[in-house]
Amino acid sequence: MAEKTIAARSQQQGPQTREETRSDERYVSPPVDIYENSDGLTVKADLPGVAKEDLDIRVENNHLTIRARANHVAAGEPIYREYGLVNFFREFELSDKVDQLKISADLKNGVLTLNLPKAEEAKPRRIDVKVA
């Protein structure tokens, strides 16, 4: 599986005289770990502050896309904030060895786990030898 990640927007160059306005269009690439076993691939992505309804995972034209919107969980209007939450975006190019119809996802405690099973044709299999 080859990774194809959208580059983050470049920050304004030069000295800043005031804090940059936070925009909903900003995003970061979430860090991921990818594991391979005999059944397929497991992708774990860190998505802090993301709820299930704010997560969009799509497979289209051999591309797996993760989009997520993070929200503060505290109720009320913030009176002081030292950091702002940004949106997440990451895209992967899938090979034909992944069974795209059987991809599953699970979100728990801010960690997204994607299971990408291998296609049956890509799984190793044992050939029985017949003795005549």
Image: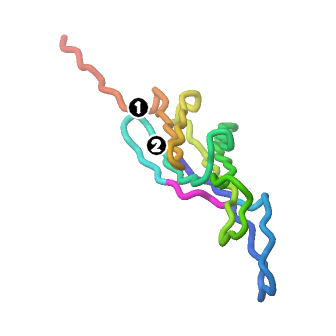
Residue type, label 1: Lys
Q: Which residues are magenta?
A: 28-32
The residue tagged 2 is 42
- The residue under label 1 is 123
Q: Residues within 10 Å of mark 1 (few under 14, many from 20)?
A: some
Toward the viewer: 107 or 126? 107
Taking depth in this image into account, of 48 and 5 the one nearest to the observer is 48
Identity of the residue drawn at 55% across and 33% down: 103
Residue 12, picture quadrant: bottom right
Q: Secondary structure at mark 2?
A: strand
**Which SS type dominates the magenta stretch?**
loop
> What is the CA distance from the residue labelled 2 to the residue labelled 1?
15 Å
Could you classify mark 2 by the number of other residues whose Cα lies within 10 Å: few (under 14), some (14-19), or many (20 or more)? some
Q: Position of residue 35 (x, y in %)?
A: 42, 47
Q: Is residue 50 left or right of residue 36?
A: right
Q: Measuring 69% from the left and 60% from the top, which residue is drawn there?
A: 86
Give me the residue at 66% from left, 43% from top: 55
